[in-house]
Each structure stands twice: as structure tokens, then as C-alpha cells.
Image (tube, grey):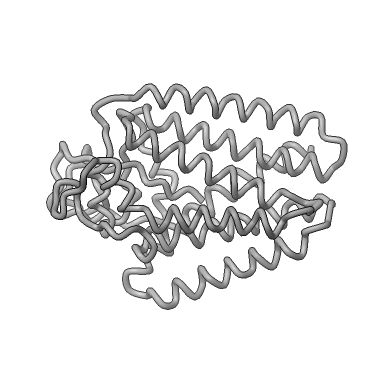
């Protein structure tokens, strides 16, 4: 029963948190101050939750730390999708100034966001040093690693790495990703994700305490969801349908076969947008 409860909680949290981040990003266009106040308040509550459960080893503390890590992650995702914390380059790949390499140009579009995530990981490692409850730290690190894997896939190439989940303000990002092929890295990352899921599942099944059972099951479920998101990169499915309630509606004149960015005024049936990595 504990396994099923943790799986249900993690799955529902993933779905709701992602939708709320998308809704906040949409609202940020007209209510930036209010949105950032809400996101920052949630993040501060997450930090407080991690501190409060630092040495607690109950089932409840595992869940509190889990949601606290999600709160911090949601802040990073919101600031990125709103466009506050992205990178110094905010134009298409072929636009001036032209960079020395495609990788450098792509990295500059998300540099500040990536540095902020890395800094948060370092801060959490310091904050949670010697902690008995490492659930929050491990959840955030798992999300971070899987995010990097996904970004590498859409940069190197994944045929169906397209989605309408990116807001129009970040439409320039689509010029940095490849959908004309599926790179070899995808299969490496898929195998790694599957191996991680298997290891976390074994850890959950052999946990010695209810706290550890909850911790490892939550992590295993998130690893499974990350594996599913990797599969979305090569499957011709519209994953954004899961969060239609939180997204802007496309113009009625747009072709139903077009999977471009919401609100795009110059899209065509052949236009493509990168899969949004806004997974909370």
C-alpha cells in the first residue's frame, strides 16, 4: 500500500505542478510581479520545508521534503518560461551576432538558467550535509540530471522532440534544436534512465524503514516519468494534451496538424517547436 500511495502522489504532483508552472508562465505576461511573488513565496516555503525535515525520518518528512524540492524546481521553471532567467542570447541561431559554434549559441540562450540550477544543487548539497532525510536533495538532483539529458537529446537530435508547451516569448529557441534525426545519445540516455529506474525500484523494494520506502518509491516514480518523457521525444504523440487546462489556446485559424508554439502568428504546417523542458 505504501508503494501505491507514493506512486500516486508522485504522479499527481508531476501533473499538477507542471500545469501550474505553465499557468503561471502564461499569467506572467500580464501579471509579472504577482506571479513572481507567488513563485518566490512557494520557493521560500520549499527551503523552509527542507530545513524543517533535515533530520526527520518519518514517512511524512519524506513527503514534505519531496514537495519542498518540487517548490524550488517550480521557481526555476517559472522564471525560465517567463523569460526572466534564460541567457544573454535571445535571438535565433542564424541571427546576429553569429556565434563561433552552434553549441555555444545554444548554450548562451539558456546559460543563466543552467548556472542558477547548478548553483541551487551546490547550495542544497551544502544545506543537506549530514542530513538524515535526503529526499529533497535527491529529488532535485534527479530532476536536474534528467533535464540535462533531455536538453542534450533535443540539441543533438530527436525526431519528435516537438511540442507546443513553450510560450511564444521563447520561440527563438526552436532554431537551436534538431528534429531531422534521432541521435545515438538518445539510446544511451534511454538505457541510462531505464537502469536508474531499475536501481531505484530495487532500493524501494528493499528499504529497511517506512521513511526509506517512501523516499525511494517517490524517486523511482519520478525516474519512470522521466523515462516516459524521453520516449515522448521519439513518439508521434502530443504530450501537451495532458496540460491543455493550463495552456493558452491556439488560434482557430491555425492548422490542427501544426505543432508550433502557442500564439505563433507566422506558423505553417511544416513549422516545428522544441519540446518544452518545463517539467516540474
Looking at the image, which is closer to me, 58 or 241? Answer: 58
Location of the N terminus by quadrant is top right
Q: Which residue: 17% across, 42% down?
A: 255
Q: Which residue: 37% across, 55% down?
A: 247
- Estimate the x, y position of residue 125 in percent, counting from the top left: 66, 53
Q: Is residue 213 left or right of residue 48?
A: right
Q: Is residue 255 left or right of residue 188?
A: left
Q: Residue furthest right?
A: 208
> In this rendering, is residue 69 above or below 274?
below
Looking at the image, which is closer to me, 191 or 70? Answer: 191
Q: Which residue: 23% across, 52% down?
A: 172
- Estimate the x, y position of residue 97 in percent, counting from the top left: 16, 54
Residue 242: name its quadrant: top left
Q: Is residue 257 left or right of residue 138?
A: left
Looking at the image, which is closer to me, 114 or 197? Answer: 114
> In this rendering, is residue 98 above or below 145?
below
Looking at the image, which is closer to me, 240 or 102? Answer: 102
Counting the numbered discs, the total is 0
Amino acid at each position: 500500500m505504501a508503494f501505491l500511495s507514493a506512486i500516486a502522489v508522485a504522479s499527481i504532483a508531476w501533473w499538477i505542478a507542471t500545469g501550474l508552472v505553465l499557468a503561471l508562465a502564461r499569467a506572467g505576461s500580464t501579471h509579472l510581479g504577482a506571479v513572481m511573488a507567488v513563485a518566490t513565496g512557494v520557493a521560500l516555503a520549499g527551503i523552509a520545508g527542507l530545513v524543517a525535515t533535515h533530520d526527520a525520518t518519518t514517512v511524512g518528512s519524506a513527503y514534505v521534503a519531496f514537495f519542498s524540492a518540487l517548490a524550488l524546481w517550480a521557481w526555476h521553471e517559472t522564471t525560465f518560461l517567463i523569460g526572466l532567467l534564460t541567457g544573454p542570447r535571445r535571438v535565433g541561431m542564424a541571427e546576429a551576432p553569429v556565434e563561433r559554434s552552434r553549441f555555444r549559441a545554444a548554450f548562451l540562450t539558456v546559460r543563466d538558467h543552467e548556472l542558477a540550477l547548478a548553483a541551487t544543487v551546490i547550495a542544497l548539497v551544502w544545506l543537506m550535509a549530514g542530513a538524515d532525510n535526503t529526499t529533497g536533495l535527491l529529488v532535485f538532483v534527479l530532476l536536474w540530471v534528467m533535464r540535462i539529458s533531455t536538453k542534450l537529446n533535443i540539441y543533438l537530435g530527436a525526431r519528435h522532440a516537438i511540442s507546443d508547451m513553450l510560450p511564444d516569448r521563447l520561440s527563438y529557441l526552436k532554431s537551436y534544436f534538431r528534429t531531422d534525426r534521432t541521435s545515438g545519445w538518445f539510446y544511451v540516455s534511454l538505457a541510462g534512465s531505464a537502469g536508474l529506474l531499475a536501481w531505484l525500484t530495487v532500493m524501494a523494494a528493499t528499504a529497511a524503514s517506512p521513511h526509506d520506502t517512501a523516499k525511494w518509491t517517490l524517486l523511482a516514480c519520478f525516474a519512470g516519468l522521466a523515462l516516459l518523457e524521453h520516449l515522448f521525444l521519439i513518439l508521434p504523440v502530443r504530450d501537451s494534451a495532458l496540460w491543455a487546462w493550463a495552456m493558452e489556446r491556439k488560434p482557430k485559424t491555425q492548422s490542427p496538424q501544426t505543432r508550433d508554439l502557442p500564439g505563433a502568428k507566422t506558423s505553417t504546417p511544416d513549422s516545428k517547436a522544441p519540446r518544452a523542458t518545463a517539467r516540474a
